[in-house]
Image (cartoon, rainbow, N blue to C red):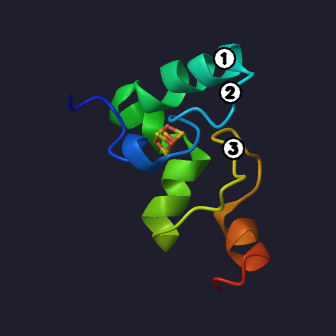
Amino acid sequence: MSDICPNVAKCPIFTGILKDRTFTTNAYKQLYCEAGLEGRNKCKRFQCKQKYGKVPDNLLPNSIKTLEEIGRENNWL
Ligand code: SF4
């Protein structure tokens, strides 16, 4: 379906890394993964993948870090 994020198959958030936190995972899915282009454009994981082609495993969709900070922390800049 076109309104689901193209990264879902490989995204640990979507595939259930937060196993014991179903409520949080479902909220993320509703807000970002299954909310069309507008939703995923707000997701920091999606933005990071767009910019760097990769995403730190522990980055949350609602992280307040800037892409710049994420890049620096991971030595991608
Ligand atoms: S958390 Fe972000 S990158 Fe991962 S599937 Fe959802 S919208 Fe896509």
Report which quarter residue 6 is drawn in. Answer: top left
Considering only order in the chain, which callout, 3 or 1, is on the residue closer to the N terminus?
A: 1
Residue at which label 1 appears: 22
Badge 2 amino acid: Lys
Q: Is 16 on the left-hand or right-hand side of 75?
A: left
Report which quarter residue 63 is drawn in. Answer: top right
Badge 1 amino acid: Thr
Mark 2 CB lies closer than 8 A to ligand 1: no
Question: Label 1: few (<14), some or many (≥20) within 10 Å?
Answer: few
At mark 3, the secondary structure is: loop
Badge 3 amino acid: Leu
Q: CA distance from mark 2 to mark 3?
A: 14 Å
Q: Quadrant of the N terminus?
A: top left
Q: CA distance from mark 1 to mark 3?
A: 15 Å
Residue at which label 2 appears: 19
Tell us which disc is closer to us: 2 or 3.
Answer: 2
The reply to whether callout 2 and callout 1 are in contact (CB within 8 Å) is yes
Q: Quadrant of the C terminus?
A: bottom right
